[in-house]
Image (cartoon, rainbow, N blue to C red):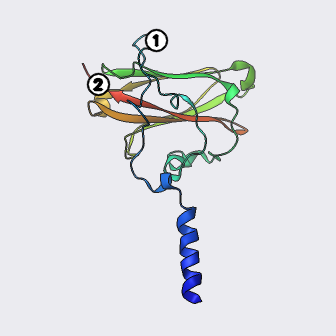
Amino acid sequence: MRQRLLSTLLLTALLGCSKSDSNPIMDFGEGEGITYRTANNIPIGPRDYTDWTSDGEWNKRERALFADLGLDLNGAQRPASVAYITLYPNPMMGDYARWKLQTNALTSGSGGYTVSGVLVDRNYNVQQRFGPQRNILNTDYEINCVQLGLSPNELYRLYYVVSNASGLVYKGHGDIRYSPQ
């Protein structure tokens, strides 16, 4: 009886573990895993529809990247508050790429938003942190691929969180490839 109870408890614990929480390497999805954009921010080539949009539930490793924010990162979001998010060029072909996030002023309220981002490699190793930066409309960051020592033809992921005084507003990710010319 005791062995049966122990087996049941162990099975329940194993079933409660999320596969994505235990996987140390990130899945970039089907195809090339990135959304192509020119240096002028014009879409070109394949698109990954999971990139640069609102994410659903994040696993423990993803939430841990923003533990210092003190937010419920799997809580309700308000996606209408964000107009667009993009990174260009993608793949990053020169030394720099630009990450832009545009919020909607009508929904921002008088306090504005706070934007935070974390660039990681496929093993969730942090390459660069952005913010938190407080703003009302636009957030614009430059990513220096050479200075960061990014590996050529490697995939990276940029996670981002938008919040305000009420809590989480929006969260998501975008995948990036560094392909120097």
Residue 133 visible in this rendered orientation of the protein: yes
Dot 1 alpha-carbon crowd within 10 angstroms: few under 14, some 14 to 19, many 20 or more? few
Number of marks in the image?
A: 2
Looking at the image, which residue sits at the far bottom? 1
Query: Where, quadrant-wise, is the C terminus in this rendering?
Result: top left
* Amino acid type at mark 2: Ser
Residue 161 visible in this rendered orientation of the protein: no
Q: Is residue 20 left or right of residue 83?
A: left
- Occupied quadrant, residue 44: top left
- Occupied quadrant, residue 6: bottom right
Query: Where, quadrant-wise, is the N terminus in this rendering?
Result: bottom right
**Are circles 1 and 2 on residues that touch, CB within 8 Å?**
no
Give me the disc on residue 179: 2
Q: Residue drawn 42% across and 42% down?
A: 27
Q: Which residue is mark 1?
A: 42
Real-space Cα distance between discs 1 and 2? 18 Å
* Amino acid type at mark 1: Ile
Percent coordinates x, y for residue 40 in the rendering: 43, 10
Percent coordinates x, y for residue 51 in the rendering: 50, 30
Q: Secondary structure at mark 2?
A: loop
Dot 2 alpha-carbon crowd within 10 angstroms: few under 14, some 14 to 19, many 20 or more? some
Q: Secondary structure at mark 1?
A: loop
